[in-house]
Image: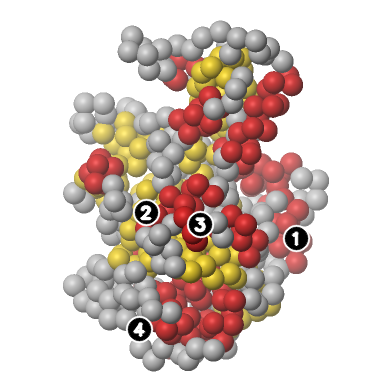
């Protein structure tokens, strides 16, 4: 076990931010570079100072312990300072996806009753109307990465001398997880959750040290990205590169060649795009020693192509918002193509068949996981909480089987949810949007694999009388969904049909469409 990440008595006082902010100061690394973003570089001492000043700023704004603030920010140094500053003050930060719609944010603000929203200025048009419509929202503070309103408020504040006296099991931060009906679920994590993911994954599997430079294409608002670019590097004394713009292949290649990260966290869709890009550098132009993938299953061909190019195996793993980070993964010393590897030490897994009994070797079943980073519950959603958190076990909703060597093989979802670019997409939400178009009578959305083996949404559409199934209509519907929902949710293919398969009670049978 890494000495920087000691176990604590789960009945004791513990403040996650206090732990994260002080670990490198105690180790004599206060002057070491902690973060590099689009605006500059920052030391671990600056991280601590600015987070403590942020804590004071929130207290001065009237926020009390366990009250929520919503963060919708692009990746810059202001995210770790704001996130940790809130926790230091005992305030609960709610990290949100920057790719969502105004209605999504309205729901999250109303659901969490966040009093303050910290928002990157580029989203001002989306958020300003919500100040009047959401009664619990008192103020929006805009961020520009290094300057702007948030920076001004923090600059005027003094360092909070002491962190809030929080309990190890006390609520620490929230992440919203997508729901099968499209309504997100506020997932509550405790003060020790971040420390436990670093102790059980970052150190034993990735072996991150203070010599590493890490870069996560997955943004900080993802559970995956939060561990990659905040928890793991801080608790290992590494340097983290943050990039505000979208992780296009060109932007990622620029970071890999200019900043020379040694640890890279990606998703299968991005690895496929990088391999297809003519400007992908040769091994001698980069400094990578380890690469990881999560969010969706990594096709064998992609991982083999990456190994042939860079002599590095991509460590495919699976985690969830409910478990905070990866709990099942391949390892450098124990790797098998086409699998998600084996359970991490500290986590227990079981696969249950349709009868609820333990699955036999090779038998398909639903994956359940047990471990210390499990969330407390979903906020304001007792039914979903009871369906997902079963005592000490968490239902993942993922179908798996175990091969004869003990490797776990992903076999899809137990529900109809899709993973697109590592982000859940509800078919119901896309279907409802399609049927709002005047030309659409009915719609069904299923998962379809593209030429790289990556999952994307495909829509089957029954048109209203008077509308024709033309290529122009297909494009019209794609553009319409893009305009109504987060862009990654739109159907990449639209197939026009005369009717949809249904049960006797009228429920659409999506499974009958999956192979069409």
Of residues 245 and 250, the one drawn nearer to the viewer in this rendering: 245
Q: Nearer the viewer, mark 4 or mark 1?
A: 4
Point out which mark residue 111 bears: 2
Q: Position of residue 248 (x, y in %)?
A: 70, 51
Q: Position of residue 134 (x, y in %)?
A: 44, 57
> In which image quadrant can residue 247 be found?
bottom right
- Disc 4 and disc 1: Cα gap in Å? 39 Å
Circles 4 and 2, Cβ within 8 Å, touching? The answer is no
Q: Nearer the viewer, mark 3 or mark 1?
A: 3
Point out which mark residue 254 bears: 1
Point out which mark residue 163 bears: 4
Q: What residue sits 66% from the left and 42% below the top?
A: 272
Of residues 293 and 483, the one drawn nearer to the viewer in this rendering: 483
Q: What residue sits 56% from the left and 60% below the top?
A: 128
- Disc 4 and disc 2: Cα gap in Å? 27 Å
Mark 3 burial class by Cα count in 10 Å: few <14, some 14-19, many 20+:
some
Of residues 238 and 445, the one drawn nearer to the viewer in this rendering: 445
Work out whether mark 1 precedes mark 2 in sequence or the reverse, and give the earlier one. Answer: 2
Q: How many marks?
A: 4
Q: Is residue 212 visible?
A: no
Q: Secondary structure at mark 1?
A: helix
Mark 2 burial class by Cα count in 10 Å: few <14, some 14-19, many 20+:
some
């Amino acid at each position: 076990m890494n000495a920087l990440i000691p176990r604590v008595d789960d009945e004791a006082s513990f403040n996650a931010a206090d732990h994260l902010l002080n670990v490198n100061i105690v180790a004599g690394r206060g002057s070491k570079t902690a973060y590099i973003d689009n605006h500059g570089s920052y030391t671990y001492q600056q991280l601590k100072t600015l987070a403590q000043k942020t804590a004071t700023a929130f207290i001065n704004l009237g926020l009390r312990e366990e009250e929520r603030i919503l963060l919708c920010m692009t990746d810059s140094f202001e995210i770790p300072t704001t996130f940790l500053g809130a926790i230091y003050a005992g305030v609960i930060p709610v990290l949100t996806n920057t790719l969502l719609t105004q209605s999504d944010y309205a729901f999250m603000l109303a659901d969490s009753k966040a009093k303050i929203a910290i928002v990157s200025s580029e989203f001002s048009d989306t958020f300003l109307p919500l100040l009047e419509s959401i009664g619990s929202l008192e103020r929006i503070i805009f961020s520009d990465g290094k300057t702007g309103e948030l920076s001004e408020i923090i600059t005027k504040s003094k360092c909070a001398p002491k962190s809030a006296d929080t309990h190890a099991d006390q609520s620490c931060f929230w992440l919203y997880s997508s729901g099968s009906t499209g309504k997100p679920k506020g997932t509550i994590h405790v003060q020790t959750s971040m420390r436990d993911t670093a102790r059980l994954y970052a150190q034993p599997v990735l072996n991150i040290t203070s010599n590493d430079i890490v870069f996560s294409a997955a943004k900080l608002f993802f559970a995956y990205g939060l561990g990659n670019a905040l928890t793991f590097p801080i608790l290992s004394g590494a340097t983290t590169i943050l990039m505000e713009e979208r992780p296009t292949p060109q932007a990622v290649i620029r970071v890999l060649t200019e900043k020379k990260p040694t640890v890279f966290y990606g998703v299968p869709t991005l690895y496929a795009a990088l391999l297809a890009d003519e400007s992908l550098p040769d091994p001698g132009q980069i400094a990578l020693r380890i690469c990881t993938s999560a969010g969706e299953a990594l096709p064998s061909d992609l991982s083999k192509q990456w190994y042939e190019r860079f002599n590095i195996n991509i460590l495919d793993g699976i985690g969830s918002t409910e478990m905070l980070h990866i709990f099942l993964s391949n390892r450098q010393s124990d790797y098998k193509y086409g699998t998600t590897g084996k359970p991490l030490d500290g986590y227990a897994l079981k696969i249950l068949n349709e009868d609820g009994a333990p699955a036999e070797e090779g038998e398909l079943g639903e994956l359940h996981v047990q471990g210390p980073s499990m969330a407390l519950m979903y906020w304001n959603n007792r039914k979903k909480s009871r369906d997902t958190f079963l005592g000490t076990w968490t239902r993942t909703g993922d179908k798996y089987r175990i091969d004869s060597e003990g490797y776990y093989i992903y076999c899809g979802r137990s529900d109809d949810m899709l993973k697109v670019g590592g982000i859940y997409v509800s078919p119901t939400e896309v279907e409802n949007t399609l049927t709002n178009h005047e030309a659409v009578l009915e719609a069904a959305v299923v998962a379809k694999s593209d030429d790289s083996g990556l999952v994307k949404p495909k829509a089957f559409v029954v048109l209203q009388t008077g509308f024709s199934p033309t290529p122009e209509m297909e494009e019209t519907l794609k553009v319409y969904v893009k305009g109504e929902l987060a862009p990654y949710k739109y159907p990449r293919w639209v197939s026009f049909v005369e009717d949809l398969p249904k049960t006797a009670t009228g429920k659409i049978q999506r499974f009958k469409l999956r192979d069409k």
